Structures are given as C-alpha cells and as structure tokens.
C-alpha cells in the first residue's frame, strides 16, 4: 500500500489527530536521543501545549511529577516520551506510535528489564488498539513479520517535501593512506567541506566515538593504559587532560611516562570527536564549528542550545556522535561526512551488519532535506562490505534480502531466539566455577530430556571485566516458549542449591534477544 502523504511524522500527526477526534488518547514513543524540543514543538504547534505531556530521563523529580499528574488527571491526550512512557497512566488509549522502531534504546538492559516494543504490542492486543511502528530502516525481525503478513506494511515512496535522496560516495581509506594522506579527512571530503562553506551551506560530520584518542600505548614495551575496574582501554579527553573509562566513569591523569618500563615513548592512538574537532579547526580556521556528544551536552538544556545554534545557521560544521543524526531536520545541511564507517562492523554482535546499515542510512538522511540536493561521503576501510554498499544505494530491500539469508543459514533471529546467560563476580574463579556448573546442568538436561535447544560453551564476555566484576557468558539458541521458561527456572532452582563462598556477590544475568551482545 502506498501512502500519498509525505513524511512519516506527518502520518503520525494525522493518526493522532484522528484518534483525538474519536475521543481517545495516544502514546508516541521516540528514542531518548531523538526526544528534542524540535520534536515536541511540532506536536505543540499542531495540538497545543495543554493536550501534551512529555516524559524522559532529563526531567527533574518535580517536572516528572507534574507531567505524570497531568496524564493521571486526564488533561493530556498525547504522551510523548522515551521507552518508559509506555507505562504512562493514560485513560482511553486509542493509539501507540513507536518512531525509529529499530532503535536498541527501546530495550532496557538494566533492572527493570523490558522491551517497550513488546509491552506496546501486548497493550495493543489486549485493548484492540492500533500500534504503528515507523522506521526508514526497520528492525530485521519486524520486517520479517511484515513479509509473513503478521503485521501490515505501509510504505512511503518519497521523502518529505518530495526532496531527492542525497548522492552517496564511498571513499576507500586504504587508497588515501597509499596516496600519502594520513589525515582522518579524505581529500574528497576536504574539498566538499570547503565548497560547502563557500556556498554558505551546513555540514554534519559523524564519528561515533567520544574523546580525543581511543587508547594510549607505550611504543617501547606495548603497554596499554586500561581502567583499573574494567578490562577496557581508557580514552583520552583533551579538554580535561584526563584518561576516562566510558563504562564505569573512572578517571586518571594523562600519562607521559610508561608505568611498566618508564619509557617516555608514549603514543596516543585512535580518533574521537574531540580530535576530529581539533583537526577541523586547523583545516578550516574560519569555519564556525561545534561538537555535540555526551561530554558537551551534560548541562541542562545544552542539547537544545547546540541544536538551536545549528538550526539558526550560526554554525557551519556540526561534529558529533549518533545524537546528531536522529530526529533532526536541518534544511540547510547539504553535506554529511561519515569519518569511520567501520566502527560498528567490528563489534562482537550478529547484528553488526544491520547496525552499520541502519546508522549509515540514518546519517545519510540528514543531507538534502531542503531545496538543495544533498551529498554524503562515507569513509571506510571496507568499501566492499555489503551493508556499506547497500547504504550507498540507500536500498533497504537489497540489504534485507542479503541479511535474511545469512540469518537463516547461521540460525539467528528471526529464525530462532537467543538467550544469553551471564555470570559476574568480583572473584574470577567463582565466576568460572558458577557458569561451568550451570552449563553442565543445562547440558545434562538437554541430553536426558531431548530439549530442542543449541547450547554453546561458556566463554569470557567480550568485555570480561566491568566495575571490578569478572564476566562470563553462555548462549542458547531456541524457540522461546513456556518450555524454555521452565528450563531456565529449573536451572535457577539448581543454582540455589549450590554452596559457593560469597554467593551474595555473584550475579546471574539472563537476557532474551539482548539488544547488545557485549
């Protein structure tokens, strides 16, 4: 079915309008990162502030109470919020909309654990109401359901305002290195930025890594500076001259002498948004540049201030992580540069290709949203990777057809469910002992009862120490149902019988189809 209306946000607005006419209420979920004043303002201008309540993590306790009260009293007919807004106490619900439904932030990986999409699906079924899932790059599992006609697929064939898709070019960074260019900015991207500045157009540069350098190493002995609490290298932040762990928040002073061999031959490797900002300022000293990442938006309203500056054309170049690419409409942006497209390809996750395609396509969508045609430059060391090639073509169907064949061949979702069982403790021997006991118990159950699951051997987690806890995990592939719930519950009952020193220190973490595999 082809809709004639241009732009998915306009579709949402019309659906909500129709729901209000029927005397019912609506919930609109957006990823936290996209929940900007720009998003909310569009709804306020359409429906008025009185009818809208907003819920997200940046609200103070008082603000949250006021919004919650507004909903409870029935004053708000529309709730806009991040994942927890699905639990809003709204009466007479008639519609739930989940924008950017593919976004992993809809799944809470911390207690209380829940998937807002699954909660929304349950509420919609129980109350016989409409649930709308919107995305330019749908989750593979969601699109698979649409192909099987378990959900209805509605397609927008044109961009909002009927604007053209941007031109996308791939730059092979291997060739840049061979030509003698060691900068993180390719010659092609440099020329396009220069041209954009001259034409008084705006540029977004995307790099999904914070900080200045991503790791610090001694060139003499190979020592790398790691977090004392986590098995992760520390990231250098030039504005504070500190090394910081992005997992537990540990900070220490920058090093100039190797702690191991006392050599002064210390080198700062890798590239983060701070380093990119410094390099752009050197290359284009007259350009008005601003950076947007977790480190620059930690003040209240700082997120809004940066976006407003950019929206008002007082900034030429916006540098940032994924928070710059979601939910924003900047008509004067005609150039988007992806500095390193390979980052998400190299993660230990069966969704690596999907995440890469999604983020690159979302980034590309920021260019050329106004009257002028957009251009996207993707820099990569893997130009032949199919997810990068599909991003260049902006062809979701081609990506889906390729990826779904791989998933079927390797037995990954949607052709099975994945359960991860993780064990963590401050003592490494205890961690290993517990997970091996659990694994042996499950293995024996599978053998004697012929349970239809694939159980993999326990291994250290990809990041095997976080916040002074050693982490191991094992993976189960299965078709989730009541029998699997019983299977896991029996394992936990068996665990309760174990006599383990400092058992209170051991944590068992069970996740069904986790958003991240780390």
Image (spheres, rainbow, N blue to C red):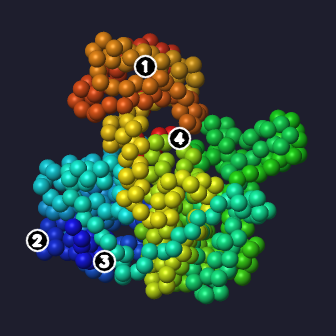
Instruction: Between residue 481 and residue 501, name the one nearer to us.
Output: 481
- Asked which secondary structure carries label 4, the reply is loop
Q: Earlier in the sequence, mark 2 or mark 4?
A: 2
What residue would you read off at disc 3?
6
* Residue at the spot 39% in from the left edge and 29% down from the top edge: 476
The first of marks 3 and 2 along the sequence is 3
Which percent across, then down, holds residue 429?
Answer: 57, 19
- Are the residues at dot 2 and dot 4 in contact (C-beta closer than 8 Å)? no
Q: Which mark is residue 22?
A: 2
Task: Report the side of 173 relative to 343 (left or right).
Answer: right
Whether 123 is drawn above or below 70: the answer is above
N-term mark: 2 or 1: 2
**C-alpha distance separating marks 2 and 1:** 54 Å
- Classify residue 47 by image quadrant: bottom left
In this figure, which residue is indicated by the disc labeled 1? 439
Distance from the alpha carbon under mark 2 to that under mark 4: 48 Å
Helix, strand or loop under label 3? loop
The residue beneath circle 4 is: 348
205 relative to 476 in the view: left or right: right
């Amino acid at each position: 079915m082809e809709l004639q209306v241009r732009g998915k946000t306009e579709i949402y607005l019309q659906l909500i309008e129709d729901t209000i006419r029927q005397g019912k209420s609506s919930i609109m979920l957006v990823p936290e990162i996209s929940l900007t004043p720009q998003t909310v303002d569009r709804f306020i201008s359409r429906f008025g502030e009185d009818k809208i309540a907003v819920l997200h993590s940046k609200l103070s306790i008082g603000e949250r109470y006021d919004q919650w009260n507004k909903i409870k009293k029935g004053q708000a007919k529309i709730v806009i919020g991040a994942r927890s807004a699905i639990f809003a106490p709204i009466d007479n619900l008639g519609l739930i909309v989940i924008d950017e439904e593919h976004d992993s932030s809809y799944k809470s990986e911390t207690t209380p654990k829940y998937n807002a999409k699954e909660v929304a699906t349950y509420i919609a079924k129980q109350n016989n109401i409409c649930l709308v899932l919107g995305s330019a790059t749908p989750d593979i599992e969601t699109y698979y359901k649409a192909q099987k006609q378990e959900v209805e697929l509605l397609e927008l064939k044109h961009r909002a305002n009927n604007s053209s898709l941007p031109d996308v070019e791939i730059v092979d960074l291997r060739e840049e290195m061979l030509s003698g260019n060691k900068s993180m900015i390719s010659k092609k991207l440099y020329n396009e930025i220069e041209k954009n500045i001259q034409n008084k157009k705006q540029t977004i540069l995307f790099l999904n890594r914070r900080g200045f350098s991503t790791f610090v190493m001694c060139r003499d002995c190979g020592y790398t500076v790691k977090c004392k609490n986590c098995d992760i290298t520390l990231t250098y932040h030039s504005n504070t001259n500190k090394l910081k762990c992005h997992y537990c928040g540990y900070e220490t002073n920058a090093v100039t002498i190797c702690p191991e061999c006392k050599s002064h031959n210390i080198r700062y490797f890798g590239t983060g948004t701070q380093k990119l900002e410094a390099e752009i300022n050197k290359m284009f000293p007259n350009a008005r540049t601003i950076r947007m990442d977790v480190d620059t938006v930690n003040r209240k309203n700082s997120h809004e201030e940066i976006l407003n500056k950019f929206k008002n054309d007082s900034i030429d170049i916006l540098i940032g992580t994924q928070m710059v690419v979601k939910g924003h409409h900047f008509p004067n942006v005609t150039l988007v540069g992806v500095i390193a497209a390979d980052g998400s390809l190299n993660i230990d996750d069966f969704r690596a290709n999907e995440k890469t395609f999604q983020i690159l396509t979302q980034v590309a969508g920021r260019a050329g949203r106004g009257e002028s045609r957009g251009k996207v430059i993707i820099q990569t060391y893997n130009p032949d990777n199919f997810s990068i090639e599909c991003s260049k073509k902006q062809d979701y169907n081609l990506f889906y057809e390729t990826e779904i064949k791989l998933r079927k061949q390797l037995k990954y979702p949607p052709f099975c469910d994945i359960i991860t069982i993780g064990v963590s403790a401050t003592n490494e021997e205890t961690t290993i002992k517990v997970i091996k006991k659990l694994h042996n118990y499950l293995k024996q159950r599978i053998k004697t009862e012929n349970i239809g699951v694939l159980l993999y051997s326990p291994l250290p987690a990809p990041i095997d120490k976080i916040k002074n806890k050693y982490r191991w995990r094992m993976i189960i592939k299965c078709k989730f149902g009541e029998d699997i719930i019983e299977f896991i519950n029996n394992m936990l009952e068996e665990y309760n019988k174990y006599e383990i020193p400092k058992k209170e220190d051991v944590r068992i973490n069970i996740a069904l189809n986790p958003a991240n595999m780390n």
